[in-house]
Amino acid sequence: MSASLEGIFSQEPIAGVFESIKPGFPTALPAGFYTVSKSEPAANGLFTYDKVEGTRKTARAVRYNAKSSVRNVSGVDTVPVKAMFSAEHLDFDLARLINIRQLGGNNVEAIAMSEINRRLGEARQLQQNLRNAAVHLSLMDGILYFDIDGNVLPTSASSTYSIDWSVPASNKDQMTDVAGSPIIGTTWATNSTDIAGDVNNIKTTALKRTGYPLKYAVYGSNILEYIQSNTNLANQINGDAIMAHGLNESGELPSPFLGLTWIRGDQFFWEDNDGTTRSNVGADQVLYYPEPDPSWYDFVETPYLFTEQEGLVDISAVSSRFGPSIQTKVTSDPVAASGIYRDAFLPVINVPSAIYLSDVTP
């Protein structure tokens, strides 16, 4: 039995297919970095977050039952931001799909639906790729760049808009401890470098600076060789049969190692609008993160306006939606069908000094 265009493009089945698509973009960080932790109510995408520095000070002691001492809140800035709003549409060729109304058109109908589902799957993957790329670039670069058309960029070149999470200089490259001394003074490419001492210094600095213990280390493609060639660490690895076996079996750093969970950085990449594959993690980088937690990191969703009517008469027909969505339309002038997909979100680093973006070859 043939199907009508209304049946094929009705909102409920299309939305069901759209939401069931499994995206295919690498997401190797802990799930908490990709999971929505907060919803903001403003339909224009504007909201504020508290940028926190953290404190290692203590409360004051006073004489028993004495008047309390005043304490001024410090290290907190309220920062206004705007969520990333993505809206694109794809067009369906009705001249081809019209055959679904012909007699005996079951096979044609199946082919038509397969093509619609393929296009929807691609749209859904584009949405998820944007979310994942935004998470990775925020955490691994500390900044998001966009060109005039809204395409994500790998650098500031050609950028017309950026979102900078202001990761401090003390937490980048060779980094500095709380006393201002460089943490990585000697390249890890030298076999005698005290790599374990550097890692422990970074972990201690994190505790002193913000109180957030580091748990994850995302490492670049050269780091495994530096560690395997390091005199002290090679002896440590080879002296542990389980660790040595795990490394030989997987070709990756075992976890836990030096008190951290290690994640291969070469699996984080994205493709820019020109079709060039961009890597998120440099070959000589090690990037350190605490366990994802809303106290220092949020994945925020904001609403956006939605309506199924054209030529509005009643404002009550306008509603708000959260998360990725698809809206399909069949218009009469010209006769055409399209699917509009939207999303509004932003990964937010509330405590930028909680993450460390190191380069181990000064």
Image: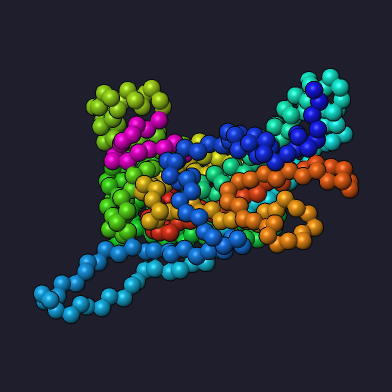
Is most of the magenta stretch helix, strand or loop? loop
Q: Is residue 326 left or right of residue 334?
A: left
Residue at the image point whose x is 31% and y is 25% from the top: 244
* Residue 194 on image: x %, y %: 28, 43
Image quarter for residue 113?
top right
Between 126 and 237, the one lying in front of the other is 126
> What is the tally of numbered marks visible in this picture?
0
**Residue 21 in view, yes or no:** yes
Residue at the image point whose x is 68% and y is 57% from the top: 318
Q: Is residue 132 magenta?
A: no
Q: Quadrant of the N terminus?
A: top right
Image quarter for residue 62?
bottom left
* Residue 143 on image: x %, y %: 53, 56
Between 75 and 311, the one lying in front of the other is 311
* Residue 269 on image: x %, y %: 55, 40
Residue at the image point whose x is 47% and y is 54% from the top: 38
**Residue 181 in view, yes or no:** no
Q: Relative to 56, does residue 12 appear above or below in the rendering? A: above
* Residue 67 on image: x %, y %: 18, 80
Residue at the image point whose x is 38% and y is 22% from the top: 249
**Colouring method of the image:** rainbow
Please state the extent of the stretch shown in magenta in the rendering: 252-266
Q: Is residue 319 left or right of residue 225?
A: right
Between 5 and 230, the one lying in front of the other is 5
Q: Relative to 11, does residue 179 appear above or below in the rendering? A: below
Q: Relative to 195, does residue 301 appear above or below in the rendering? A: below
Farthest residue, direction left: 64
Between 342 and 293, the one lying in front of the other is 342
Q: Is residue 4 left or right of residue 345?
A: right
